[in-house]
Image (cartoon, rainbow, N blue to C red):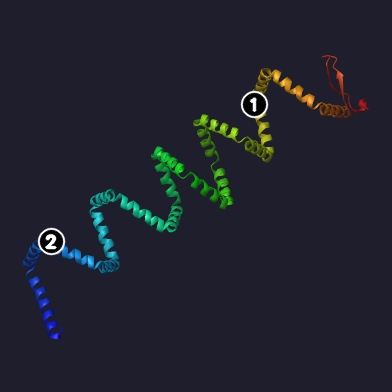
Amino acid sequence: MPIGQYVVKVVDKVRARQYRIDNNEQSNAAARSYYQEHKEERLAYNKQYHKDNKERIKATQKAWRESHKEEIAAKNKEWREANKEAYAASRKAYREANRDKIAASKKAYMEKNHDAIKARKRDNYYKNHDANLSRRKEYYQANKEKCLLANKKYHEAHKDELNAYNREYHRIHKVELSAKKKVYNEAHKDEIKARRKSYYEANKDVLNAKNKEWREANQETYKAGRKAYRERNKESIAAKKKVYALENADKLSAYRKKYNQEHKAEISARNKAYREAHKEAMRQKDHDYYRKRVAEGWRYKKDPVTKKNRWVYVGNDEAK
């Protein structure tokens, strides 16, 4: 373009701008009138222009947003504060109208950034651990039935996956988890005991039926487990039995007496069968016991009062 034409064009632009400034209302009215008369044409032109220059417009908008980020955020915040109800209503309406679109977008984003999201959630959870636990507990108490139903449905749908994950996690963190569990159990001993007791009382019949069914289906495993437990806790079990026997002596005596009366024939038959099967061993045992008592200065004599045989201590000198 020759320099003369360029200068004329610039001058015309300046004059046109100055004219619009001097005749603002008139210029605006003329512009509005022109827009209304050529609306469809203008819209078609704008649509075609955006279609032809899509990437360039996006790049320009992105660059502008990056350069005016703080200004945009401040204006948006100011508008939201001033129009809280309208903003909430518009968000709700948008979510309702685009539910599937939002769900698909979330799913795609989760799949693309799965590890990063998981790590961020974990960090945030442990950073706000106490607050999260408190909030979850409050929500659970307020929506107990809903939570239980949702948990049950989820566990049923992902049973195998959850079991495999739990097994693998416990295998990797076995020592750490055992230590944490031990510390927690020591700190909340009474609370855990009370909770277990109340749960057992509330679900007694169901638990007993389940336990019985499992024992019948896994007899060998159950017996081996009980045997191993008794071997590991021999001393503590003996001490507990001793304490229980002392505290409930009368009760146990009455129970034994009643049981012996009800199962008299069965007990006699069982004892007789045992004596027949272990005759020699029992005879040897009695003989050893007799010799031991005699060596200690005891004699098996008839009592002059009761006229029945019993052990009488005669002393070592007399025994010799």
The mark lying in front, picked from 2 and 1, is 2
Question: Seen in the image, is 71 located left or right of residue 280?
Answer: left
The mark found on residue 191 in the picture is none
- Residue 32: % across, % down: 9, 63
Q: Residue at x 41, y 58 (%)?
A: 113
Q: Amino acid at mark 2?
A: Glu
In this rendering, is residue 52 above or below 196? Answer: below
Q: Pointer 1: what residue? A: 248
- The C terminus - image quarter: top right
Q: Residue at x 6, y 69 (%)?
A: 23
Question: Seen in the image, is 239 located left or right of residue 5?
Answer: right
* Label 1 packing within 10 angstroms: few (<14), some (14-19), many (20+): few
- Residue 279: % across, % down: 82, 26
In-front residue for pair 239/169:
169
Q: Amino acid at mark 1?
A: Asn
For the residue labelled by badge 2, is the local secondary structure a helix, a strand or a loop?
helix
Q: On the image, which quarter does residue 24 sit in?
A: bottom left
In-front residue for pair 67/267:
267
For the residue labelled by badge 1, is the local secondary structure a helix, a strand or a loop?
loop
Q: On the image, which quarter does residue 59 sit in?
A: bottom left
In this rendering, is residue 27 above or below 255? Answer: below
- Residue 14: % across, % down: 12, 77
* Label 2 packing within 10 angstroms: few (<14), some (14-19), many (20+): few
- Residue 287: % across, % down: 86, 27
Q: Residue at x 69, y 39 (%)?
A: 231
Q: Residue at x 34, y 55 (%)?
A: 105
Question: Seen in the image, is 92 located left or right of residue 132?
Answer: left
Decide: marks 2, 1 in contact (CB < 8 A)? no
- The N terminus - image quarter: bottom left
The mark found on residue 40 in the picture is 2
For marks 2 and 1, the one nearer the N-term is 2
